């Protein structure tokens, strides 16, 4: 299984574990000042996605702010990271 991320009319296919941020070495780069170098981590957990916020600014998961913790959610889910809105779901390969 892989995570499919849709944002700004783009689709990215990421592994079952994905790091998102503006720094080097992440799986999905989001260039904005209010995105941390390593902002959050996504993990596929069966038919669920675990979102772990690693930033000091927080990540919105389906409209609820997550700050420094993690949340297990059934996809599709909407993440707001800085000015970016991402739609996450799981694709069986």
Image (cartoon, grey):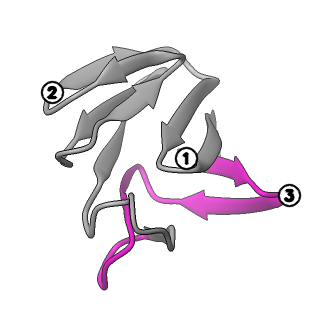
The image shows residue 63, relative to residue 87, as above or below, that is above
User: Mark 1 or mark 3, which is nearer to you?
Assistant: 3
The residue at which mark 2 appears reads as 69
Mark 1 or mark 2, which has the lower sequence index?
1
Disc 1 secondary structure class: strand
Mark 1 or mark 3, which has the lower sequence index?
1
The image shows residue 17, relative to residue 87, as above or below, that is below
The residue at which mark 1 appears reads as 3
The image shows residue 23, relative to residue 19, as above or below, that is below
Q: CA distance from mark 1 to mark 3?
A: 16 Å
Q: Do tag 3 and tag 2 residues touch (Cβ < 8 Å)?
A: no
Q: Do tag 1 and tag 2 residues touch (Cβ < 8 Å)?
A: no
Residue 63 x, y percent position in the rendering: 52, 16
Residue sitting at x 30%, y 49%? 40
Residue segment shown in magenta: 1-27
Q: CA distance from mark 3 to mark 2?
A: 29 Å
Residue 90 seen: yes
Disc 3 secondary structure class: loop
In the rendering, which numbered label is found on residue 9?
A: 3
Residue sitting at x 33%, y 29%? 50
Answer with left or right where residue 54 lies relative to residue 6: left
Mark 3 or mark 2, which has the lower sequence index?
3
Residue 45 seen: no
Q: Is residue 64 magenta?
A: no
Residue 2 x, y percent position in the rendering: 54, 49
Residue 68 x, y percent position in the rendering: 14, 33
Instruction: Tell me if mark 2 has few (under 14), some (14-19) or many (20+) residues whose alpha carbon lies within 10 angstroms of its own.
Output: few
């Amino acid at each position: 299984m892989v995570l499919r991320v849709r944002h700004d009319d783009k689709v990215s296919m990421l592994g079952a574990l994905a790091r998102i941020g503006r720094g080097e070495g992440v799986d999905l780069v989001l260039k904005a000042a209010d995105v941390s170098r390593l902002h959050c981590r996504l993990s596929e957990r069966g038919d669920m996605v675990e979102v772990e916020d690693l930033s000091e600014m927080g990540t919105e998961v389906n409209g609820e702010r997550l700050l420094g913790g993690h949340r297990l959610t059934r996809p599709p889910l909407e993440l707001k990271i800085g000015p970016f809105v991402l739609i996450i779901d799981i694709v069986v390969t």
